[in-house]
Structure formats: structure tokens, C-alpha cells
Image: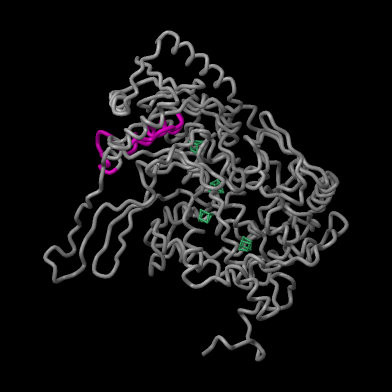
Amino acid sequence: MKVIQIDKEKWADGLDRLAGSYRLFAPVKEEEFYNFKELAKDEAPDLNYLNTRLSPKAIIYPQSEIMFEYSLDESAEDHHIMKEVDNSYSPQAVIGVRPCDAKAFLLVRLNFDTPEYKDPYWIRAYESTTLVGLACDSPCSSCFCTTAGCGPYHEEGLDILLVDADNHFLAKVLTEKGEKLIKAAGWDTAADEAEAGKKIETGKQAAETKISAFVNTDRLPEIDTVELYKAPFWEDVSFSCINCGTCTFVCPTCWCFDIQDENHGKSGVRMRNWDSCMFPLFTVHGTGHNPRGTQLHRVRQRFMHKLKYYVDKYDVGIQCVGCGRCVRSCPVNIDIRRVCELMNNYGTEKDSCAA
Amino acid sequence: MTSYIQKIQEVSARLLKECKVDMVIGFRKGTIPLMNEPYFARTAEDVQNLVWDSNCGINLANYLTDRKENIGIIAKGCDARNIVTHIVENKIKREQLVIIGVPCKGMINKRKITAMSEGEITEVTEDENNVTVKGDGFEKVLNKKDVLQQNCALCIHRNPIEYDELIAETVEEQKDIDRYADIREIEALSPAEKDKYFEDLFSTCIRCYACRNACPLCYCPTCFTDEAKPQWVGKSQDQTDIETFHFLRAFHCAGRCTDCGACERACPVGINMRLLTRKLEKDCFDLFEWEAGMSLDVRPPLDTYKPGDPDDFIK
Ligand code: SF4
Ligand code: SF4
Ligand code: SF4
Ligand code: SF4
């Protein structure tokens, strides 16, 4: 595996060159929070961040995305015919994405890119994206990536992993996409591989020891689904939930959407918008009946999906990368780590006192 | 604060033991700094989890809507006013409730404190007047007065006006507060400037509806935003739809909002949507000398008619 040394002096020049062939997205600070934004010309990424308020999922999977357009003008020949819109899928790169958020794209992929179903919008956007990760040297106290199948230096899902080494970055090139981007940026100083490898390993170990929050997920696969569904702790867990969509909207691994037609005068668009299992509207039937009619149903759905149904269906761990965003953003402090503990301990001695 | 906690636990345990209530709604300690979680206690054991400090900014009246049990509820000044509003609007019966009033000294602003800190906050402690914030490599003592939520800094009803038990001596109410300086500034803008102002204000909204759902007033079985037939508002990130949601929601709170601040506190992206509800609060006061939730016996101005009501808006 190739490691390139990027002197910080050459960083901006390289990004400038990239801007010629990629749309660049990176964290920038807006008032109080960091978020991913498309960089304007001469705007620099601000890599001095712990984590962004919202995940970068919208770069590949926008909150509102137009799929088709149509005319309602009956004098037009093509009225009432859905026509695909000409979305641009020009190459784009996300600079400074955290390893957890990059891994999250792989989780989401399980839903959008399957042997049976291919979501063309997501796939095209994903394929045109190069993910340049930034290893996480100061994880937040609410991050639990190392026990959620990920880690501060995790490489899965990334095309390049950048490691901050004072006056330069070490760039570990992981895929062909990554190779292409490094070339386009003109960063061409190969690092001494053995030495760089050592540095990266030391950084990784230091970062991992800083992770102070964990979840146990070992028993989740073996617990009976129906038993877990009926567990008495759901009332306690769900009581405070106000069923906003915050946890699902900030989450890099939540993928649900809703399709809407919107008409303006004689034309209209068919679009999809993020949806949330926490909204009552998510499951309401045409008859008015709602099979997930209570807050308890909805809260249980979110956690059962992430920590049980997904685990059972895909057998690749939990549907969470431990970024901690939902923990930090939930207005009433519902904490997935606590719920995971309750679920994982269900049926053992420990579960009686955990609530 | 610890004296508050002791008394809250004592009263709650007694009410449960005497079977006066089936549950007590309060807060349990949060899993991260500057947060507590709304919580219900049903047993003497649960009661041990009830806490109180300056991170109890969520409005607990929100948890009463249409409940059937007999409930003890911990209520600071604004919660109590929203409980009154709930009773007036038939969302809960007075007889079902034992209101455990907490004279409030103000809740602290999580976002402001976070923005003031050099790194991630890992521990926060407080005493009567100060908040001590600790993180990796820093420690800071802040004066609580300087880091209150804005609604608390402006609050003139810290003592619950309706209660059955009071867990401490009443606190002194703040006087000579200019509650609406920022609102007057917006009122003075031209329509075009206002348009721009609100466009900027809501530009980062992700429509998670935490503001609506944290609000005890927003209990409609189907919110107008969620109606499909007819569909009043589009569901995308369209700016007009976003603003329509906020403006209409604010109007639905006119004459009912107590400025408890739960909506602003809940917003994950830090939007101050209270600017809208406070304008309406100000109007209700100017036009009808009305403050929401101050009495169980007076109907709110927007569901009554009085011959003396101002009518110069009818042209
Ligand atoms: S868990 Fe928290 S963030 Fe999620 S819907 Fe409930 S209140 Fe909102
Ligand atoms: S569930 Fe929470 S911690 Fe897990 S990936 Fe989603 S936002 Fe992050
Ligand atoms: S609108 Fe906001 S301030 Fe007013 S009562 Fe609702 S949550 Fe409280
Ligand atoms: S809580 Fe904030 S982001 Fe969510 S809908 Fe309200 S204003 Fe928008």
C-alpha cells in the first residue's frame, strides 16, 4: 500500500488543482457548529474539528432529491409522462471525512445496492465520490466506534486515509479512486513506507486508547427477536422520546425516505425526501390506521432495526458506526449506548437492574 | 440544588406511597454533560433516580397530554404555566395532577457553554451561582447568570403559579426586564429586510420537528405539516415550505406560548425560532394584556370575544 507525504505547505495548492476536476466537500465552521459544505473557490477545509453536527450522508444522498419531472399541461405532447431529470454526477470528493462516516456509506450501501435492487441515484452519486478520510486523533467522549465495527483510523469505505503528522499529512492510498485523486492533486512525494507505517500504527493505538465509551453487542444475534420486542424496558426507554426525527436525520447510517410529487402550476416533480421511523406519518396507512401508533412502537422500531433486525438480516454487526451524533443531539438524552446495553443484557441477570 | 433533590425525592416517595399518584414525572441524570432526561418514577426505588439542576430545560408539561393516570409532576415556573394551559385546553384534568412546584433559578444554555469552551466538555458541576466546566486541558468557572438560556434570562415568572407542593422557598422574581428588545429590532425592519432575516434564520433547518415536538402546545393529532389531504406544506427542503412550517406553527402558539424555551433548546442546529413566538407573545400582551398560563379561570384571548377587544386590524 502506498503512502504519500503531503507537506502542509503543499496542501492548499493540491486542493486548488483538485477543484479543477472535482467538486470538493469539506467541514467548515458555521457559527457554532461544523458541517460539510461544498467549498467555494479559495475556501479551505477546516480540519480542526471534532465531528460535524450533521453527517456527510447528504453529499451522496441529499435530504431532498428530484428524480423525475413532468408536465401537467394537456396541450403539451408529453404531458403526464415522468421524465428523468438530468442530475449531474460529476466527480466529487469529500475531504476530511471521519472514518466512522466513511464506513457508514458501506452500511447504507447494503440497502441501496443489492443484487435485486439498485437505487440508481444513490449508486451514481456514490460511484462519483472519492472519500478522503482524516484519522481521528481526538475522539469525543460519546464516540464508541471501536465497539461498533469501526475505529478512529478505520480504513473500510475510504479511498485515502490522511493522518496528521504535524507539518505534513501521511496519505495512505487505499483504492484506485484514491490513487487518481492523489495524482490529480499533484501530491507525489512518496513517504518512507516502513517509517510511515510505524507512525500510523502509533497514532492509531493512541487514538484507540482515547475511546472511552463502548457498547456490548455480542448477545444481540442470539436473543429471540420476539422476546426482545416484548421486553418490558421499552416503556422506560421510550418515555422521554418526543418523536422528532433528530436522531435519524443526524445519523450517517439511517437511509429511509419518502416519495412526494410536488406540482407548481402546470409542471411538477417527483422527489424523495429523508423520512424517519420516529415520525407517526412514516407508517400511517391510507385507512388512517397506524400499525406503529404509539411512541413506544416507534422508539422500539428504531433500536430494533439498528441493533437486531439489521444484525439478523445482514450478519455484519449493528447498523451503527458509533459516531455518537444521536447521543449528542437528542433533545431529551435518549442514549443508544444505554439501550444497546439493555438489549444485549436482556434475559441475563444484569438486565433487572440496568433500567 | 441538592436540597431541591432531597425534597423532590421525599415528596415523590410520599405521594407514591400514599397512592395519591401512579407516577411522578421528573428528570433523571443525563448520560452526557449538560443534559438530563425526562423520566417517570413509579416505585420508591425509581424515586432515587430523580434529580434537579440547571439542565432541566425540557418542558415536562409535554409529557401530560391525554394521560389517564394520576400524576405527580415536577414543575418549574414555565412548566406550571404550560400545565395550566393544558388544563384549560382539556389535555389533562386538574384532579389528576399533583403539581410539585420548583421555584426556578434558570436553566443554563448548553449551546452557549459549548461554544465558549476550547474543547469537548467532559464534566460540568454547579453550585448556587457558578458553573464549573471541565474538559481535556481546560477548566473554567462561569457565572450562571452569564450562561442562562435566553428565555430564562428574560423570565419574570420563575415561581410556579399553580402547585400542590412547593419544594423550596419562592425565589425573587426578576424585575425591570426588557423582554422584547430583539423583537423590536426585527419589527423595525422593512418587509424586504424581514424576508431576508427569516430566510437566513431558517436556512439551516433540517425539518426534524424537534422544536414542534418538544413543545407542550403542539399536541394536534395530525399537525398541519403532516396533513396529506389537503397538503398544506411541501415536505422538501424548499425554503418557502420550511418558513411556512415555522410561521404557521408560531401562529398556532399565539396566546398559548409561555416562552419556556423548550423548542429552541431542542433544535439540533441551533435555530432561534422563539423569535416568532415571542413576537406573538408580545402582541398578545400589548393587545389583550394577556400572559399565557397564569390562571385556570380565564379563557385565552383567542378563544373569547370581548366588546373592548382591539379591532383596528379589521379594515
Ligand atoms: S430518540 Fe431523541 S432525537 Fe430521536 S426521536 Fe426521540 S427525542 Fe428525537
Ligand atoms: S445510531 Fe447514533 S451513534 Fe450510531 S451511527 Fe447513527 S447517529 Fe451515530
Ligand atoms: S413555542 Fe417554544 S417557548 Fe412556546 S410553549 Fe412551545 S416550546 Fe415553549
Ligand atoms: S428543531 Fe430546528 S432543525 Fe428541527 S425543525 Fe425545528 S428549527 Fe428545524
Q: Quadrant of residue B278?
A: bottom right
> Seen from this angle, which residue lies furthest right?
B169
Q: Nearer the viewer, residue A149 or A228?
A: A149
User: Is residue B108 toward the left or the right of residue B228 in the image?
Assistant: right
The residue depicted at 51 percent of the width and 32 percent of the height is: A322
Q: Is residue A310 above or below residue A265?
A: above
Q: Nearer the viewer, residue B122 or A231?
A: B122
User: Is residue B242 toward the left or the right of residue B136 in the image?
Assistant: left
Magenta segment boundaries in residue numbering: A93-121
- Across and down, in percent, residue B112 comes to 65, 47
Quadrant location of the C terminus of chain A in the rendered image? top right
- Across and down, in percent, residue A242 comes to 57, 52
- Across and down, in percent, residue A37 comes to 42, 43
- Across and down, in percent, residue A214 comes to 58, 27
Residue A118 drawn in magenta = yes
Q: Is residue A114 above or below residue B144?
A: above
Quarter of the image where ligand 3 sits: bottom right
The residue depicted at 70 percent of the width and 72 percent of the height is: B291
User: Is residue B2 toward the left or the right of residue A237 in the image?
Assistant: right
Q: Nearer the viewer, residue B185 or B20?
A: B185
Residue A263 drawn in magenta = no
Q: Quadrant of residue B293?
A: bottom right
Q: Is residue B44 above or below residue B275?
A: above
